[in-house]
Amino acid sequence: MAPHRGVVVFMTNPQLPAAAEAGHLTAALRKAGALDRGAVREVKVLHQRDTIVSHIIRLRLRYVGESDGAPQSLILKTPHANFAKTLANAGRQEVAFYTQLAPKIPAQVVPRCFDGTFDEESLAWHLLLEDLTDSHVIATQWPLPPSRGQAMAIVTALGRMHAAWWDHASLGETVGSWMSTDDSTKLVETFAGHYDRFADLLGDRLSEERRIIYRRFIEQSGRLFERYHSRRNVSIAHGDAHIWNFLLPRAGVADVVRIFDFDQWRINVPTGDLAYMMATQWYPERRQALERPLLNRYYETLIAHGVTGYTRGALDQDYRRSVLWHITKPVWQWSINIPPVIWWNNLERVFSAVDDLGCEEFL
C-alpha cells in the first residue's frame, strides 16, 4: 500500500518467519546497499522446499518508493525444523562464510548475501541470498555427471574461489581455524572406531585388499596429515563440492558459474574439493576422460588469479593424496546414517580412482 503522510505501512504474512517480514527486508536491503529510499511493501512466497539441514523459501518482493536496482526476489534459508539444534553448526558455518568470507571473494563466484545472522543462544539462523533461479540452473539431475563444458566451467569457478584465499594471511587467524596435531589424532581415532564397525557390517563385501589399505591408512595417518600441517599451499575448501552445489548460467545468459551451500567449508588442501567432485562422484570412464583436462584448467585458473610457487607436479601429488583421503568419506557417511545408495557407490568409485592413480604409494 502507498505511503501516507510520510509513513510506510508494510503488508506482512503471519506465516512467514520474521526474517521475511517486509520491515526486516527493507532494513536488510538498505544496510546491504541494495535499496535506496524505497521500502518493501509486500512479500509473497513463490516456492519452498526442504534440504537435509535447511528450509529454502523463494520470496517475491514488491516495493513502494525508489527501488531501482533492488532485487525483485530473494532466497531465504533457515534451519530445517527437525534438525535446527542437532545440526546447528551447519548454519553457523554457512552464516560465517557469507558474512565474513564471501565479501572478500571476487564478484560472481558465490551468490550475493544481503543479510545473515546466527543466534548462539537460540541457535536460530537465516540467510537472505541473491535469487539466481531465472538466470542459472543445476548442471544435471543427480546422479548424472556433467558435460565436458559444464565441468570446465565448474572447475574454473572452484579455482577462482580457492585462489582468492590461497595462503591468505587471515587463515587460522581471523578466518577459520587449524586442527592441532592432537585434534587430527583424535579425528583418526574416531574414524578408526567407525571403520571397525563398518568393516564388520560389510563382512566379505569389503575385500581383504581394501581392508589392508584402510589399516595402512590409519597406521600412516600421522604422516599423511603432514601435508595439511605444513600450512602451505592451502585455502578455503568448500568441503562438499559435488557438481550439484554449482549453478550454471542458463542458455543465452551471459554470466558465470556460482557456488553455493557452504556449511562444510574449512581451511584445507584445496585438491580435496576436486577429488570429492571427480574421484568420489564419477565412475571410472567419465573420470578418466575428464580428470587430466580439468586439473589442467584448474591449475591455469590458479595461476591466472595470482597463485605463485605451486607447480603443476605439486597439484598432481596433492590431488592423488586427496583421492586417498576420500576413502574415509563412505565410512563417515555411513556413520551418520546416509543411505547405502550414496556411500556404497562412493566406496566403489573412490577405490577405482585409488587403483588407477596408484595412491597406495603414499602408504
Image: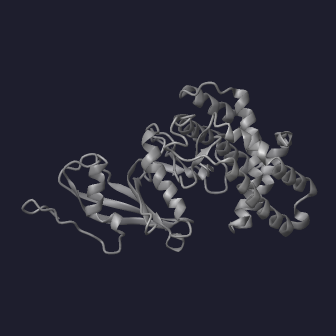
Which residue appears at 34% of the width and 60% of the height? Answer: 60
Q: Is residue 286 visible?
A: no
- Residue 68 position within the rendered picture, expressed as x and y whole percent measured from the top left: 24, 46
Q: Residue furthest left?
A: 5
- Residue 89 position within the rendered picture, expressed as x and y whole percent measured from the top left: 54, 61
**Quadrant showing the N terminus:** bottom left
**Quadrant showing the C terminus:** top right
Q: In the rendered image of this protein, does residue 128 appear above or below residue 17?
A: above
Query: On the image, which quarter does residue 153 sit in?
Result: top right
353 relative position to 105: left or right: right
Query: On the image, which quarter does residue 18 sit in?
Result: bottom left
- Residue 30 position within the rendered picture, expressed as x and y whole percent measured from the top left: 26, 51
Closer to us: 61 or 269: 269
Which residue appears at 26% of the width and 57% of the height? Answer: 26
75 relative position to 298: left or right: left
Query: On the image, which quarter does residue 10 sit in?
Result: bottom left
144 relative position to 54: left or right: right
Which residue appears at 77% of the width and 61% of the height? Answer: 344
- Residue 71 position within the rendered picture, expressed as x and y whole percent measured from the top left: 32, 51
Q: How many marks?
A: 0
Q: Residue furthest front?
A: 182
